[in-house]
Image (spheres, rainbow, N blue to C red):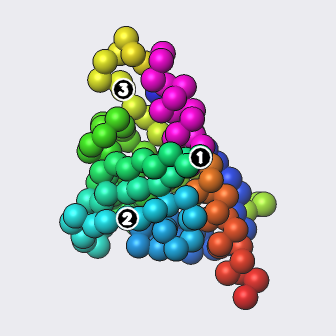
């Protein structure tokens, strides 16, 4: 499964990157995130339980987060739940109209035969929807900060 979301945000690239990397902030600015619980915490690596809601359906997963300031990437590796093994990469590219923020999700299903059934549910219904909402809410938050 490979899915991606992107959005243009008119804010400084560094501010966008730091907001994406700051998981403690997410439940405060992303209304669909219920909580983020730290299991391990560090400057560039965290292990967290993340919980969100999609159309009233609560979901949660455990992820390792890597904050790569040299590459300006925020990466996640899902450690538990239905998306165990999934790799997620946030990238930030400066363009003339704004910073293009992309979230790419890659997952090899543990039971490949179930992929055609699982992909539209896990990839389309849950992941693509939640990532899109995450980007839209971050955009609104960051652009509102620029107007203050």
Residue pushed farthest top? 113
Write down the quadrant of residue 146 in the picture.
bottom right
Residue underneath mark 1: 55
Q: Position of residue 66 (x, y in %)?
A: 33, 58
Q: Residue at x 72, y 77 (%)?
A: 144
Q: Position of residue 58 (x, y in %)?
A: 45, 49
Q: Residue at x 54, y 25 (%)?
A: 120
Q: Nearer the viewer, mark 3 or mark 1?
A: 1
Mark 3, Cα crowd under 10 Å, few <14 / some 14-19 / many 20+, is some
- Mark 2 → mark 1, Cα distance in angstroms: 19 Å
Q: Nearer the viewer, mark 3 or mark 2?
A: 2
Q: Residue at x 28, y 67 (%)?
A: 38
Residue bounds of the magenta highlight = 116-131
Residue 100 in sight here: no
Q: Quadrant of the C terminus?
A: bottom right
Q: Nearer the viewer, mark 2 or mark 1?
A: 1
**Overall secondary structure of the magenta stretch?**
helix
- Mark 3 → mark 1, Cα distance in angstroms: 25 Å
On the picture, is 115 further left or further right than 121? left
Q: Position of residue 11 (x, y in %)?
A: 68, 72
Q: Secondary structure at mark 1?
A: loop
Whichever of callouts 2 and 1 sits on the residue coming sooner in the sequence is 2
Residue underneath mark 3: 108
Q: Position of residue 85 (x, y in %)?
A: 30, 36
Mark 2, Cα crowd under 10 Å, few <14 / some 14-19 / many 20+, is some
Q: Secondary structure at mark 3?
A: loop
Residue underneath mark 2: 36
């Amino acid at each position: 499964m490979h899915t991606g979301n992107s959005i243009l945000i008119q804010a400084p690239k560094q501010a966008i990157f730091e907001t994406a990397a700051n998981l403690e902030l997410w439940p405060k600015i992303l209304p669909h995130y219920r909580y983020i619980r730290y299991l391990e915490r560090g400057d560039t690596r965290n292990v967290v339980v993340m919980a969100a809601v999609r159309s009233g359906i609560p979901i949660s997963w455990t992820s390792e987060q890597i904050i790569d300031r040299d590459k300006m990437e925020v990466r996640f590796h899902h450690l538990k739940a239905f998306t165990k093994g999934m790799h997620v990469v946030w990238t930030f590219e400066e363009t003339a109209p704004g910073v293009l923020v992309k979230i790419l999700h890659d997952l090899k299903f543990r039971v490949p035969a179930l992929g055609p059934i699982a992909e539209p549910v896990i990839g389309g219904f849950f992941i693509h929807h939640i990532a899109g909402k995450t980007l839209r809410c971050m955009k609104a938050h960051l652009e509102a900060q620029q107007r203050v």
